[in-house]
Image: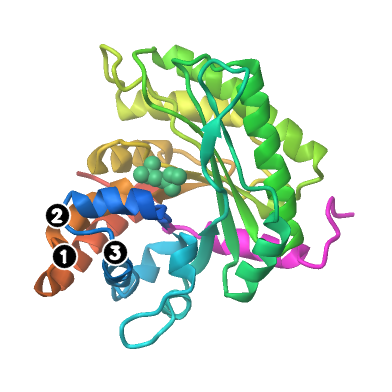
Amino acid sequence: TPIRAGSYSDELVKTANTIATPGRGILAIDESNATCGKRLASINLDNTEVNRQAYRQLLLTTPGLGEYISGAIFFEETLYQSTTDGKKFVDCCREENIMPGIKVDKGLVPLPGSNNESWCQGLDGLASRSAEYYKQGARFAKWRTVVSIPCGPSALAVKEAAWGLARYASISQDNGLVPIVEPEILLDGDHSIERTREVAEQVWAEVFYYLAQNNVLFEGILLKPSMVTPGAEHKEKASPETIANYTLTVLKRRVPPAVPGIMFLSGGQSEAEATLNLNAMNQSPNPWHVSFSYARALQNTVLKTWQGRPENVKAAQTALLIRAKANSLAQLGRYSA
Ligand code: 13P
């Protein structure tokens, strides 16, 4: 008997498995308006709705994108937007067999009683918002919460992060959205890879403990973890083989094989690093589809190439396809630089 015999159970499993198809991963373009503004500022563009729409149109109308991309995560504004020709962005995705998704968390705020840590808001009204997003065409959701190693993490912050993700996942599944569960362990800090391993073990254990307590259907979720790496300011870098070895060892200890997909975030890694690390993870078989859900590691070159100029759109789309294809090959373990 299914853990969750809701009306959406079969659809959730199908959606999760479609996103986790071989050679494909997720394009994360769910930057909040504030974060999108920072990306636009890097190419001297104002943070207007017109510019955000133009940028997302460039990305979502890239011909052939669906060969490498199985899902695209939107910010709420994007879910209701169309191309300048009037085609809904959701329909651009559908034509390429790309599942549209939606960021549903309401961002981070300080967690009282913690060591300068944060918690993630957004559970109030989430059921009705999720039902509305489903009607608009979204089929999966994302909730990103963060854990900081230099700030602890405190037991309180880890518990709150895990509990919030589990409550969100349960509400999403009741409304037909596959929840992407994203407990980001921030790269910031000078700690060793061993320390990241300890924290990842603790965080993933608590996340799956509370997911189970909330009767979440594991076959209908996707995990979006950070890779286990040394802190960004640590004296030594780790090789892709070391990162893959640490990350997979902990994932195998803490994440049930019922989960169809592990979709890594790039977390500030360079485009090349993110691809090489993913490729290293796929050198031998995994219990899950191990793939990508990158924002910056798919978009950095695209933005630089575009510069907000219509005459650069084609070249920027080509840059997107190059990164998407490289990560597609890395998902299959067949990328070489
Ligand atoms: P990065 O790949 O840039 O870390 O972003 C992924 C994401 O969606 C963070 O929530």
- State the count of labels: 3
Q: Residue at x 57, y 68 (%)?
A: 138
Q: Position of residue 94 (x, y in %)?
A: 48, 77
Q: Mark 1 falls on what kind of element?
A: loop
> Where does the C terminus fall, quadrant-wise?
top left
Where's residue 297, x and y in %?
30, 46
Q: Which residues are magenta?
A: 1-26
Task: Say whether residue 303 is magenta.
Answer: no
N-terminal of the pair, mark 3 or mark 1, is: 3
Indicate which disc residue 44 carries.
Answer: 2
Q: Counting other residues with Cα less than 10 Å from the Cα at mark 1, is it few (<14), some (14-19), or many (20 or more)?
A: some
Q: Which residue is mark 3?
A: 48
Is 4 above or below relative to 278?
below
Single out the residue that lies furthest toward the bottom. 85
Q: CA distance from mark 1 to mark 2?
A: 8 Å
Look at label 2 and name its amino acid. Answer: Asn
Q: For this rendering, which residue is in front, 10 or 299?
A: 299
Label pair 2/3, CB-CB below 8 angstroms: no
Give above or below for 163 relative to 113.
below
Q: Which circle's residue, 1 or 2, is located before the other in the chain?
A: 2
Q: CA distance from mark 3 to mark 1?
A: 12 Å
Distance between the Cα atoms at labels 2 and 3? 12 Å
Compared with residue 232, is residue 92 higher up or lower down, i.e. above or below? below
| Disc number placed over residue 317 in the picture, else none | none
Let me know if residue 335 appears in the view: yes
Locate residue 307 relative to residue 87 in the image: left or right.
Answer: left
Question: Could you say where residue 122 lies in the image, as x and y percent from the top left?
Answer: 62, 47
Which class describes the residues within 10 Å of circle 2: few (<14), some (14-19), or many (20+)? Answer: few
